[in-house]
Image (spheres, rainbow, N blue to C red):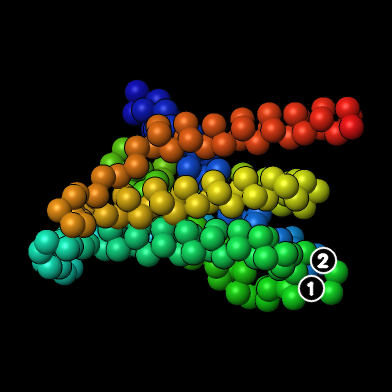
């Protein structure tokens, strides 16, 4: 019975990693598209392997020091403008969310300004090292909640490690395909950036909720995961319907 319980927990964790890894894959695909074509696969592989290693380190650290991440580090009381008590978890979520929001807005701005940001031949490309570092760091932000959930679901370190390694293998298998799809369907990159923007907003709201943050008397509430996935589904459906409708219109002109 113990083995059955461990296997069922492992399957649950793998499914959790798969669901939470969708936005991670999207970020990896967009970030790796900023480097030279001959370095793209290498950036994805090194970034994902490094990210898995960092996630394993994060798991060990959280198991040993979880109380420090959940304990308040500092508090702010500037009534009536802002109040809150910030711990390690809330700070990681808010800093990561702010960076994702900044990245998404910056890339959308480049598109609106007519700057293809290195997608055209001869354009300025991002350095492979900085892309790898960004993938590893943002993977830690994305995986923080999944690691905490894994710790809550089981106390078996081998099960948690196995689920992380399996998720890394899945990302290695799919990262290049997602990046290639975005490269061939450039319009969908806009959709991807706005999904990333939603991810950033969700992390910001989650961090604010964990810190019991209040702004001008109103408490920050975490964006519900169901609401987030519903919003993403609506965005995808709108984009697909609009693209199909645009093709039909072009045929009638």
Instruction: From the top left corner, tell me how far across and down residue 204 is, in percent.
Output: 35, 55
Q: Quadrant of residue 243?
A: top right
Give the Cα distance between marks 1 and 2: 5 Å
Identify the residue at image location x=30%, y=55%. Answer: 207
Q: Quadrant of residue 253?
A: top right
Indicate left or right for 129 with 210 as reference: right
109 or 25: nearer the viewer: 109
Instruction: From the top left corner, tell me how far across and down residue 161 is, in percent.
Output: 45, 49
Q: Is residue 12 visible?
A: yes
Which residue is label 2 attached to?
Answer: 120
Indicate left or right for 206 with 50 as reference: left
Indicate left or right for 22 with 247 as reference: left
Does 2 sit above or below residue 217? above
Instruction: From the top left corner, tell me how far across and down residue 4 is, in percent.
Output: 40, 25
- Residues marked 1 and 2 touching at CB (< 8 Å): yes
Question: In the rendered image, which quarter contains the N terminus?
Answer: top left
Q: Which of the numbered marks, if any, corresponds to residue 123?
A: 1
Does 80 sit above or below residue 15? below
Does 93 sit above or below residue 220? below
């Amino acid at each position: 019975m113990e083995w059955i319980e461990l296997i069922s927990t492992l399957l649950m964790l793998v499914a959790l990693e798969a669901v939470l890894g969708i936005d991670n894959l999207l970020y990896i695909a967009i970030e790796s598209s900023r480097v030279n074509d001959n370095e793209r696969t290498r950036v994805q592989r090194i970034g994902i392997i490094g990210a898995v290693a960092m996630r394993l380190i994060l798991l060990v650290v959280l198991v040993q020091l979880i109380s420090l991440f959940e304990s308040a580090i500092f508090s702010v009381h500037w009534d009536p403008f802002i109040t809150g008590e910030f711990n390690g978890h809330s700070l990681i979520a808010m800093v990561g969310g702010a960076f994702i929001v900044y990245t998404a807005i910056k890339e959308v701005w480049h598109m609106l300004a007519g700057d293809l940001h290195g997608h055209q031949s001869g354009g300025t490309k991002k350095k492979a090292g900085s892309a790898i570092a960004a993938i590893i760091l943002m993977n830690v932000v994305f995986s923080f909640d999944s690691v905490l959930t894994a710790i809550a679901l089981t106390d078996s370190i081998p099960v948690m490690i196995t689920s992380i390694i399996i998720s890394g293998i899945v990302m290695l298998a799919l990262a290049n395909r997602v990046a290639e799809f975005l490269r061939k369907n450039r319009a969908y990159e806009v959709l991807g950036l706005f999904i990333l923007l939603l991810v950033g907003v969700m992390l910001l709201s989650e961090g604010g909720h964990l810190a019991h943050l209040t702004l001008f008397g109103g408490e920050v509430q975490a964006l519900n995961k169901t609401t987030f996935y519903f919003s993403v589904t609506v965005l995808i459906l709108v984009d697909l319907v609009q693209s199909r409708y645009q093709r039909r219109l072009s045929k009638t002109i």
